[in-house]
Image (tube, grey):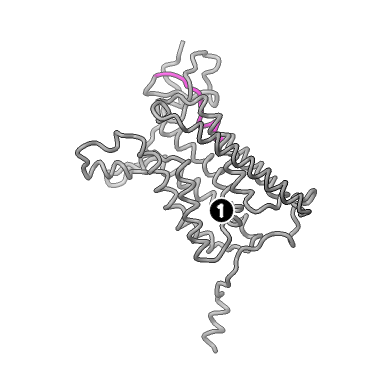
Amino acid sequence: MLLSSHWTGDVSPVAFTIDGRDIAWYGIIITCAMLIGLVVAIFRGKKHNLSVDDFVEIFLIAIPFAIVGARIGYVMVRPEYFPSPFTWDDFVHVIAVWDGGLTIMTGVPFGILGGAIWCKIRKVNLLDLADIIVPVILLSQGLGRWGNFMNQEIFGAEITDPALQWFPMAVYISRLGGFYQALFFYEMVMDIAFFAAMMIVQRHLKLRGSGLLMYGFSYGLIRFIMEFFRDDGEIYAVFNYTQLICLIVFVGCAAALAGLIIAKVKKGEKVWYGRGGIPDSEIVRLAPYHRPSKKDKTDGETE
């Protein structure tokens, strides 16, 4: 017999209200996940000669691009967002990312586009920068899945066996009155596990573009697996090309990564460093310009 309620079904999507405007947990959690990702990227970037200012610049350019791209990917396949006639309120509904509804598969490419703009301005190789930042995206994605939990979304098939009606095996979806597979949690665990694996591999693998390819490989595989279970009445009920796209990305990135490693090895180049990882002398330094320090500015004024 199904329970009538459960703590996982008692969550509210609204954190608090300011001047009549509801502030959703989804937006707060996504923002916190991005900030944690920024902090981790800053620590990773130190050994590559990138400063906090560099990452703040990248963040301010890439994140807005990523949010716009993620929202476009979410609404463009949902006709209900575009009624006729299309009013101002409908437009506000389309751009209301604070209410939830972002698609990672379109958000990441737009974010990379923002990073490419920064690289163009600062004359940094995009692949080198991506090797540092892109793996961290997987960590932020995993943490951000708790926003889906607060919205009671991203779940799988119904679980009717009372022995399995416990978290994190299942979550109680109030609007459906039953327990369902906690896919948001499953994906969070896989995101963080693959992120940790990438951190270990990148400590030993010196290969330009490895971060971007490993991210595509990892997330393509994760989403491919998740699509077998997802049954929450979302986009996949009417537009199910996601698995095919994920499979193509997964296979393509895996093949490209293997091909690059084989090509480097055949040329006699060292790509894998064993115990101790890549030595400091071999780490790529990315900052090709000099930011004036306070001392520099003082000296300049004296002259």
Residue that appears at 64% across and 42% down: 196
Horizontal and vertical percent position of residue 293 = 56, 74
Furthest-left residue in this view = 85
Give the side of residue 240 with respect to residue 261, left or right: left
Residue 7 vs 140, above or below: the answer is: above
- Numbered label tally: 1
Region in magenta: 177-188
Q: Residues within 10 Å of mark 1 (few under 14, many from 20)?
A: some
Residue 162 vs 124, above or below: the answer is: above
Viewer-closest of 93 and 225: 225
Quadrant, the C terminus: bottom right
Residue 241 vs 111, above or below: the answer is: above
Residue that appears at 43% across and 18% down: 178
- The picture quadrant where one finds residue 186 is top right
Furthest-bottom residue in this view = 303
Viewer-closest of 166 and 95: 95
Q: Is residue 15 visible?
A: no
Residue that appears at 58% across and 60% down: 125
SS for dot 1: helix
Q: Is residue 91 magenta?
A: no
* Amino acid tagged 1: Val
